[in-house]
Amino acid sequence: MRASRIAAGLILALGLGMGAAVTAQAQTELKIGWTNTIDSHYGVGVTTFGDEIAKRTNGRYKLKYFPSGALGGEREMLEAVQLGTQEMIITSTGPVGNFVPETRIVDIPYLFRDYDHARKVLDGPIGQELLTKFPSKGLVAISWMENGFRHITNSKRPVKTPEDVKGLKIRTMENKVHMDAFKAMGALPTPMNMNEVFTALQTGTVDGQENPIPVILANKLYTVQKYVTLDSHVYSPALLIINKDIWNKMSDADKNAFKEAAKIALVANRKKVNDDEANGIDIMKKAGTEVITQVDNAAFQKAVASAYTSFNKEFGEANIKRIMDVK
């Protein structure tokens, strides 16, 4: 009798062990990287997404987080996702145009009136049409995310007009649209990976940079810059992207789980952007940074008008107008 009980126990233990092994094998771990910190607007979006994915797939999918550029710069990570050596990324649109040129249209300066306008465009037909351009490049853009409106910071002088920008060496993303806009202002645009920016500002390799308030806060860029100009020259979206082959292997139910999780993550991401926008100015002022709110926006728009000739040629004047006309 005792031998029978021992045998039954061994069989049960073996069964439980096999069950655990099956569960472990069934779980798919996806590496996701981004350049901002874990507590940034990107981090809030990604961790919300990860929690929702685990919940909606009963733990069969798990995200492994790599914040703060641990896997490299945005372009490097995009290439890795394209190749399949990294599964996912949340990235600004900055380097995305090098892979999916059509997306560069959303980076045009002074294209969006405000957050409401930008969010309606990206959540609506125009934004969803742009997402369909990714699979042919080995990528699947699950959802738009958000950075916010971009502002100029520098260590040389207060910037209130385009004249004040002339001659400044400004770090930009590796984005032709942004670089063309700053050239039109008379600045010296210098593309650089985000994980190099703090040191470059600290050492004076560049005079300034341009980023939304959430990015300026998350990376503490205001601590190595004397002036922040709230000029809102460009609205900066972000994208949640996955490797195409991984996506194609998913069941329809799992794809839907990822899409629904992304919707909830986007709400959390945008809320963090809103919160940072509301609190960021006081944080920067308390740190001793001069925040310039009185900006000649009409003069800035006039300064970049010459770049619109090339924008109209590249993207089509009707396509740009279509975005501007969204109410």
Image (cartoon, rainbow, N blue to C red):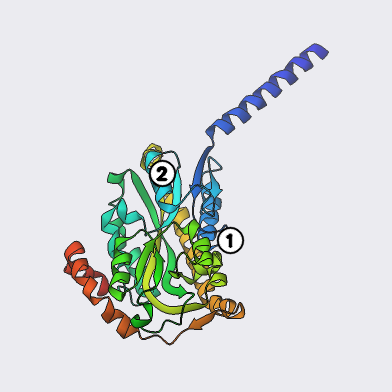
**Image quadrant occupied by the C terminus:** bottom left
Give the camera-side residue of 200 and 84: 200
Q: Secondary structure at mark 1?
A: loop
Picture layout, residue 117 above or below residue 129: below
Inspect this view and state whether residue 125 appears.
no
- Of the pair 282 and 26, the residue shown nearer to us: 282
Residue 231, x across and y down, in percent: 40, 79
**Residue 308, image quadrant:** bottom left
The local crowd at label 2, few if under 14, some if 14 to 19, many if 20 or more residues have their Cα within 10 Å, is many
At a point 27% along the width and 64% down the height, the residue shown is: 105
- Which of these two is toward me, 66 or 192? 192
Q: Is residue 77 left or right of residue 47?
A: left
Task: Count residues near mark 1 (Cα–Cα under 10 Å), then give few for <14, some for 14-19, many for 20+.
Answer: few
Residue 324 in the image: state x and y as whole percent.
26, 74
Q: Viewer-proximal residue, 316 or 5?
A: 316
Label 2: which secondary element: helix
Which numbered disc, 2 or 1, marks the residue that appears first in the sequence? 1
Is residue 86 visible to us here?
yes
Is 97 located above or below residue 64 in the figure?
Answer: below
Q: Which residue has dot 2 on it?
A: 81
Look at label 2 and name its amino acid. Val
Residue positioned 45% across, 52% down in the render:
73
- Which of the labelled discs sits on residue 39, or is there none? 1
Q: Amino acid at mark 1?
A: Asp
Residue 33, position as x, y percentages in the image? 49, 50
Q: Quadrant of residue 168?
A: bottom left
Query: At x 27% / y 75%, what residue is drawn?
Result: 304
Q: Is residue 308 above or below residue 194?
A: below
